[in-house]
Image (spheres, rainbow, N blue to C red):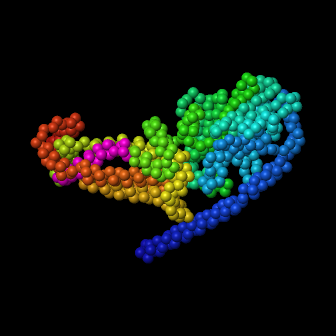
């Protein structure tokens, strides 16, 4: 193949790549324009228009409800439901929640968290009916009784009992011809995210006797997207449950489709979005469980995030009642902890060590600062300064060790020249250990303090993306510190990087590069250290840029501050605390002093003697 042919193939490849890139960009731009048009159309619709639309949809639904067929239920019970009974909606609320209930199935149809908003300012609804107003399309909560024939509460329209209901309680009943009935009562606690639910079977002792172990509770929910960044929201959304008799929790479907069958008892389970959860807790533990969760694509036209379902085996109490509680609210550590049910363990703050640091150090300090400082960019700055102040003794010790190593560079270079051969590696290592001993340097002196700081760095990595306090908190050019910040949108996706440029992530990577360049001068010129220099100066900043580009901008901002403060500390230590000439003078005087050899050096010298003995024996055999 000649040169012209090769050039031709290269040009064809470049043209094809350019055309594909252009097509992709055009397609993305069209999608963006369509999405903008939909958003503008929604924003133009006034609140009055929206209310009128919802009313029309509900009216249409009532008209479409078919005539009730009187069903023969187990043991001769027949539903006494009037023909063409219409579905009605009723609301209860407090300062935190507003819940709308439908008489079809006596179940919640819409849950609105009043003290939070979606990204963009729309009301935050954990679930709600779809655009046609059909209850059960995005949420279904029903009891199934199995006695050879199903009774599913979702199939029936309950009566709303107005005289027993008020602004904080809803009472609904499904009556039967013999005077018995099923009653659903929902009550909302004051200034709380908890909803109590009690289901009662009145005058149905025969059914309860024959179905003592045949009750199943189904709960299906479609949770919409609520945050700015889809990837971050997907990464931190999952399904959790707490097995009975255990203090910990189990997690599944962490950003991926998954289903699981559980035959043991369960105390509670949760459908968890990144910052909000829908949790069901039984007064008497669930007997068994079948969980399933699946996630929608980023371009889902309905803007949905995940579909969750749970099918729970339950027991009725002797008085014919069943009680549970719902939690509809934020994944806030303090808020969840106050209920005393281990809900807060869903928040991803790390394992036992990292979690301990987050729970007892970072979260209390963060909450304390946030109590009187409303700018969370300033809160992160103060938190970073406090952390740096606490770990400063370790930082100084690490740098002092590195400075001493830097002062030894001329001596180390002499040893490299003296022992250039690979077979002399043990001799060179022994000589270096003797040099370190005379200078009073521990080889691990620079690494160990940094390792001790690593749990704090990892705790911050876990804390920021899960911190609801940062949600929709703006700082400088970032409009939401819990999501990525973007100063440039590409219109197309770069694998592993994303479709935008995060300025905080870029500045963080640049600061990491500059700090590595500053400290790399203290590294030995030994060829074996070349790989480590390349990793610290080039690879780590690039890797962190790719990792943090789609993560919380608050996290990138923290790492940026941490790097800048560390660079300042390094300059201060070099300027006022470390005198390399003094260290070299101490080193020159060190041979006159007799210092005991460490156990490590004694073992190294013993290994050297053994290696030399083996080499001598090998040479003797070769000469024979």
> Residue 139, can we see it?
no
Residue 273 at what x, y percent from top left? 60, 45
Question: Is 395 covered by the magenta stretch?
Answer: yes
- The residue at the point 81 percent across, 44 percent down is 87
In the rendered structure, which segment of residues is drawn in magenta?
388-414
Q: Nearer the viewer, residue 549 or 463?
A: 463
- Residue projecting furthest to the left: 592
Question: Is 4 covered by the magenta stretch?
Answer: no
Could you say which quadrant of the image residue 164 lies in?
top right
Residue 449 at what x, y percent from top left? 33, 42
Please give left or right for residue 90 compared with residue 368 in the image: right
Q: How many marks?
A: 0
- The residue at the point 49 percent across, 71 percent down is 14
Q: Nearer the viewer, residue 573 or 23?
A: 573
**In the image, residue 538 above or below residue 181:** below
**In the image, residue 594 above or below residue 37:** above
Please give left or right for residue 578 compared with residue 458 in the image: left
Please give left or right for residue 582 compared with residue 131 in the image: left
């Amino acid at each position: 193949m000649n040169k012209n042919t090769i050039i031709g193939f290269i040009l064809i490849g470049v043209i094809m790549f350019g055309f594909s890139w252009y097509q992709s960009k055009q397609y993305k731009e069209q999608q963006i324009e369509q999405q903008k048009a939909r958003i503008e159309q929604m924003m133009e619709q006034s609140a009055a228009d929206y209310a009128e639309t919802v009313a029309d949809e509900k009216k249409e639904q009532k008209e479409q409800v078919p005539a009730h067929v009187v069903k023969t239920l187990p043991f001769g019970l027949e539903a006494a439901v009037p023909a063409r009974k219409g579905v009605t909606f009723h609301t209860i609320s407090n300062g935190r929640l507003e819940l709308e209930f439908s008489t079809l199935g006596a179940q919640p149809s819409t849950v609105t968290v009043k003290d939070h908003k979606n990204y963009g300012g729309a009301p935050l609804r954990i679930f709600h009916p779809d655009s046609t107003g059909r209850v059960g399309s995005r949420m279904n909560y029903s009891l199934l009784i199995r006695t050879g024939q199903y009774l599913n509460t979702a199939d029936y329209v309950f009566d709303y009992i107005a005289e027993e209901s008020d602004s904080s309680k809803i009472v609904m009943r499904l009556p039967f011809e013999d005077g018995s009935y099923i009653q659903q009562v929902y009550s909302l606690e004051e200034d709380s995210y908890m909803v109590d639910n009690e289901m009662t079977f009145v005058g149905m002792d025969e059914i309860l006797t024959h179905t003592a172990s045949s009750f199943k509770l189904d709960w299906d929910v479609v949770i919409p997207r609520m945050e700015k960044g889809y990837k971050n929201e997907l990464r931190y959304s999952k399904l959790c449950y707490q097995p009975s008799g255990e203090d910990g929790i189990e997690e599944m479907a962490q950003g991926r489709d998954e289903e699981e069958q559980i035959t043991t008892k369960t105390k509670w389970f949760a459908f968890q979005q990144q910052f909000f959860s829908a949790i069901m807790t039984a007064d008497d533990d669930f007997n068994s469980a079948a969980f399933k969760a699946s996630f929608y694509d980023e371009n889902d036209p309905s803007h949905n995030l995940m579909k969750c379902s749970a099918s729970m085996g339950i027991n009725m109490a002797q008085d014919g009642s069943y009680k549970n509680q719902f939690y509809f609210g934020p994944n806030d550590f303090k808020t969840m902890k106050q209920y005393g049910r281990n809900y807060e363990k869903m928040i991803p703050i790390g394992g036992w060590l990292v979690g301990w640091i987050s729970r007892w150090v970072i979260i209390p300090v963060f909450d304390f600062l946030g109590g009187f400082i409303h700018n969370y960019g300033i809160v992160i700055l103060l938190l970073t300064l406090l952390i740096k102040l606490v770990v400063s003794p370790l930082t100084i010790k690490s740098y002092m060790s590195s400075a001493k190593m830097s002062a030894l560079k001329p001596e180390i270079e002499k040893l490299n020249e003296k022992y250039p051969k690979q077979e002399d590696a043990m001799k060179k290592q022994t000589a270096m250990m003797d040099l370190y001993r005379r200078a009073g340097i521990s080889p691990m002196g620079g690494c160990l303090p940094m390792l001790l700081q690593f749990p704090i760095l990892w705790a911050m990595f876990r804390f920021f993306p899960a911190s609801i306090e940062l949600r929709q908190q703006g700082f400088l050019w970032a409009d939401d510190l819990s999501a990525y910040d973007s100063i440039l949108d590409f219109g197309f996706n770069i694998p592993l990087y994303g479709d935008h440029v995060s300025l905080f992530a870029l500045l963080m990577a640049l600061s990491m590069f500059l700090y590595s360049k500053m400290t790399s001068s203290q590294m030995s010129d030994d060829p074996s250290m070349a790989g480590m220099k390349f990793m610290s100066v080039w690879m780590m900043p690039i890797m962190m840029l790719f990792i943090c580009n789609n993560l919380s901008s608050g996290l990138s901002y923290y790492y940026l501050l941490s790097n800048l403060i560390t660079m300042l500390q390094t300059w201060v230590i070099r300027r006022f605390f470390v005198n390399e000439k003094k260290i070299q003078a101490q080193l020159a005087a060190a041979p006159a002093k007799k210092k005991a050899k460490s156990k490590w050096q004694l073992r190294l010298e013993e290994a050297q003697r053994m290696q030399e003995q083996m080499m001598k024996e090998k040479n003797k055999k070769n000469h024979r």
